[in-house]
Image (cartoon, helix red, strand yellow):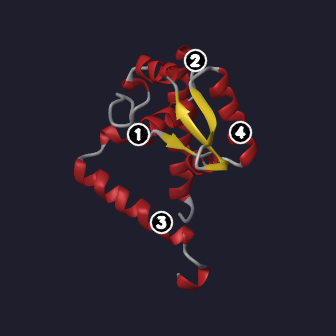
Amino acid sequence: MKGQALELISEIHLDWKRHVARALAPHGITPKQIFLLRKLKESATLTPSEVAVLIHGDRPSTTSMLDTLERSGWICRQRDPSNGKRVIITMTDAGMEKLASVPERLWRSGKVPSDPESCLERDEREELTRLLQKMHRCMNANPQER
């Protein structure tokens, strides 16, 4: 029984990622790319290190993703005028257009008919969220604190 919950969480997550990736493919964008464009729309600017944290990526894979987005014309990287060592990422007009061109129903959790949470009642979603947050805190706590 132990480990069964994590295995199921992983399976649901991977199935969901595959579903979203298939839905986005005809639009020429990946789940991580659309996620990043959404985050840039919310915050206006991000640094490469902030992007790495958001996408749970290492430095090389984050740089590769940013290179792809920049080549597509969806983002712009420039030096921070107040700190020349720092790079700032912004979304371009083309990036805004790309984001707007992809229907939310294809990628937005809670708006997709096949959303794995759609079968849960509100109180069940709240309980599941509470339990997952507890697991996350436990996983990230020092072993001495458990």
> Which residue is nearer to you in this view: 92 or 114?
92
Query: Does residue 30 lie above or below 129 as drawn?
Result: above
Q: CA distance from mark 2 to mark 3?
A: 35 Å
Residue 63's tag is 4
* Three-letter amino acid code at the position of disc 1: Glu
Query: Does residue 90 lie above or below 105 as drawn?
Result: below
- Which residue is labeled 3 in the image? 135
Q: CA distance from mark 4 to mark 3?
A: 31 Å
Marked residue nearer the N-terminal end (4 or 1): 1
User: Quadrant of residue 55 in the image?
Assistant: top right
Marked residue nearer the N-terminal end (3 or 1): 1
The residue sitting at 52% across, 25% down in the picture is 92
Q: Nearer the viewer, mark 2 or mark 4?
A: 4
* Three-letter amino acid code at the position of disc 2: Gly
Q: CA distance from mark 1 to mark 2?
A: 22 Å
- Which residue is labeled 1 in the image? 42
Residue 39 position, x and y percent, is 47, 40
- Which residue is labeled 2 in the image? 28
User: Quadrant of residue 80 in the image?
Assistant: top right
Q: Residues within 10 Å of mark 4 (few under 14, many from 20)?
A: some
> Which residue is nearer to you in this view: 28 or 9?
28
Q: Residues within 10 Å of mark 1 (few under 14, many from 20)?
A: few
